[in-house]
Amino acid sequence: MEDPWADSAGTSQPAGDNSTTTPATSNPPASAAATSSAATSSSRPSRITPRRLIAKPTQLQAVEDDPLGPLGAAAPPPATTPAAEDASPPVPPSKELPLRTTMPASAGQGKRAGPPDPHRIDDDDDALFPTGPRQPPPVQGALPSPVRTTAVPSVSVEQAAKPVFNITVGDPHKVGDLTSSHIVYSVRTKTTSKAYKNPEFEVKRRYRDFLWLYTTLHANNPGVVVPPPPEKQAVGRFESNFVEARRAALEKMLSKIAGHPQLGLDGDLKLFLESESFNIDVKHKERKEVNLGGESKGVLGSLGFGGGGSKFVEQDDWFHERRVYLDALENQLKALLKAMDGMVQQRKAMAEAAGDFSASLHALSTVELSPTLSGPLDALSELQLTIRDVYDRQAQQDVLTFGIIIEEYIRLIGSVKQSFLQRQKAFHSWHSAEGEMQKRKAAQDKLLRQGKSQQDRLNQVSAEVADAERKVHQARLLFDDMGRLMRSELDRFEREKVEDFKSAVETYLESAVEAQKELIEKWETFLMQLDAEDDETVFYRPPVVQANKPAGNTAVDRARARIDEDSD
């Protein structure tokens, strides 16, 4: 009979149950559980064989990292092969970090959980950086805005508050009879200054009005370099070239005066630009200054129109060097102007020679019977007329572009020397006032030594001494202020000289280049016509029947007349 307390697997176990004797630790947990259940169901003992209780070892099974823990639904066991069962122990689950960029991706790591990424950032990371951290997506730099701003660049407060003047001098025309004929110019002004009645106005002025403006501004502003008008010319003052050169010089003069920080605010400039009855207003102004009495004349005298004395010796080295420099510059500019005039005269002579040459060629083409030769000769004659016009135009442009600047700065140097002369007069006025003050003090000391018997006379002399001291102080301040003002004016003179000469040279070169280009184009056209030998009608021109007309007085007509006389 079977012992019910038997607890060991004896020899009475069936041979078909060998699978149950295999140690459980050599199999994976899931596989062991499945095998144990299968063996239990298949090895149920029969009723004949006595039942034995078998003790089985306790097995530990790894639980998936499920948020619900043991209560979560168990995943279905994956299918394994016998070779996988003998593999290494299972890898413990790894904890996911919150930032993927701080941990390098492993070879077997899956894609990020969640909804699909429409931008496929993970695919880019796997393709470009399979073993490194995910790089941030590239950021495209800011592109320039297609909308262009038209904002005006900012300027200083002084420049914004400064009024703008646009002055043009034009429409020169001759008025008057034979004894009082003169040229009248139209002065048109556009300004933003509130001191004028209208923003745009026009007046008529003649040359002596411009001369009055220069003299008045020079007297009102001692030490300031006032742009002077062009000089007078008794012979040829009604010629077109001279009138145009003077018009351009007067316009440049007014533009520089209006652009000056001190001269542009002078009341006499406003009177010149705006007054409709200029001559009457000027006479009224002069009469008013005369009625002011000695105070106005005293002020004018202290400004450099009075005083005198011994020869002035410059004590300031800076002013002495500038005076020597201005003398040398004036001599060089005069030499340059003389050479410029010679070149202009040479261009005019070349133009006249080209006209004579054209007349000779034309006469030769008229007597030539062969059209193959008369045609090119006539075309060459026309080309020489074009060359004559180019030389004439270039001579006039040289005067208006470069010559006018040279003449302007020769006159400006003269204006600077006038400022030096005013400073010298201010120096003499200062020392004259000091001498007068010493005389007054000597008279005062003499009265003081005489006692108090002449108290009234002493009070009068004391007042005269105080007045003399005031004049000395005023003259000294005026001399010092003129020195500082002249320093700034000479610096301004140098800056404007560089800009004006640079602009004049550029314009002169551009006009010369354009003239040469025009001549080259004409010569190339003529050569192309000569090369067209197959076409005999290139130079052919049908004869033109002209009525009898009186001979002209041009150089071409005179040359043709001389040729006709020689042929007769």
Image (tube, helix red, strand yellow):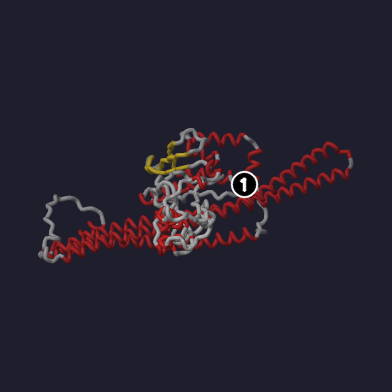
Q: Nearer the viewer, residue 12 or 551?
A: 12
Question: What residue is rendered at 46% in x and 34% in y?
Answer: 198
Q: Nearer the viewer, residue 523 or 79?
A: 79
Residue 312 in view of the camera: yes
Amino acid, disc 1: Phe
Residue 410: x and y, percent?
A: 49, 56
Q: Is residue 147 above or below residue 567?
A: above
If the image is split into quadrants, where does the C terminus sit? bottom left
Relative placement, left or right, of 385 versus 100 is: left
Numbered disc 1: secondary structure:
helix
Q: Nearer the viewer, residue 94 or 439?
A: 94
Residue 179: x and y, percent?
A: 40, 42
Q: Is residue 388 above or below residue 263?
A: below
Which residue is denoted by mark 1 in the rendering? 305
Q: How many marks?
A: 1
Relative placement, left or right, of 116 versus 56 is: left
Residue 521: x and y, percent?
A: 26, 61
Q: Quadrant of residue 530?
A: bottom left
Residue 89 in view of the camera: no
Residue 359: x and y, percent?
A: 21, 60
Categorize mark 1 by other alpha carbons within 10 Å: few (<14), some (14-19), many (20+): some
Question: What residue is rendered at 38% in x and 62% in y?
Answer: 343
